[in-house]
Amino acid sequence: MKKIKIGTIGNSLVGKTAICRNYLGEEFSTEEMLTVGMDKFVKDFEYTIKGEKKKSNIFIFDTSGQERYETTVFNYIKKCDGVLLVYAVTDKKTFDDISKWITKIRELQHNKDFPIILIGNKIDLENERVISQEQGKEIAKNNNFPFFETSAKTGEKVNEAFQYLINLILKYNNIYHDNSPFTPPENPNEKENDTTDTDSNFGINSVDSTIVMNKRYCCCFKKNV
């Protein structure tokens, strides 16, 4: 698989861009900025299958949550191999709108097994939390999505969420076993007190993801809020 295309989707100001930047090793910024249309990040990585090292590129399409850019957003999501669906645990509306985003993703990606990870971000703001972890788990379980709570500020669970999605995409595309039917990995929601084990779920050689080079291409602008 020469490249993997991942999209982020969700309301504005849930921290989608900050999650992407954290995954790329960039420092967290307290300045909140709206994505205008779409921002693209590229990350080169290596993974090992059956003892053989392979190289690939991850293209991350960081999309806007503003309605005016929905046509652009959905055009990119349609091209993706998997998505991170993000809400903020400090903002009830972003959680309530998850169903809207799910409906649209399923309109664009007709296969029921299309890889989607649900993320509740901003868990570092525990005193401002209005959405419990149990609420996030419930909506994820009802839709058969893996679920992670993350902090783009501290980096908690960010890498694990991306790693799980990459593994899920590789499995979905039958990269591990030629001509084998798709069998999703164990849903981390069903593992009590553990949402980080991404490798042992497959029963195959682990994917060893290593940053070879980080590159960032920005095709749109950001604006201060």
Image (cartoon, rainbow, N blue to C red):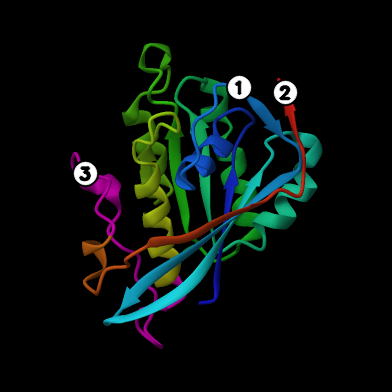
Marker disc for residue 194: 3
CA separation in Å, label 1 and label 2: 8 Å
The three-letter amino acid code for the residue at tag 1 is: Glu
Q: Is residue 78 magenta?
A: no
- Residue denoted by label 1: 31
> Mark 2 Cα within 10 Å, few/some/many (few <14, many 20+)?
few
Q: Residue furthest top?
A: 127
The three-letter amino acid code for the residue at tag 3 is: Asp
> Mark 1 Cα within 10 Å, few/some/many (few <14, many 20+)?
few
- Give the image location of residue 179, x and y in percent: 41, 88
Which residue is painted at 19% across and 39% down in the image?
Answer: 193
Query: Mark 1 touching mark 2, by CB under 8 A?
Result: yes
- Residue denoted by label 2: 224
* Viewer-proximal residue among 178 and 93: 178
Q: Helix, strand or loop at disc 3?
A: loop
- Give the image location of residue 43, x and y in percent: 53, 58
Image: magenta residue range: 172-198
Q: Main SS type for the magenta part? A: loop
The three-letter amino acid code for the residue at tag 2 is: Asn
- Dot in front, 3 or 2: 2
Left or right position of 171 against 189:
right
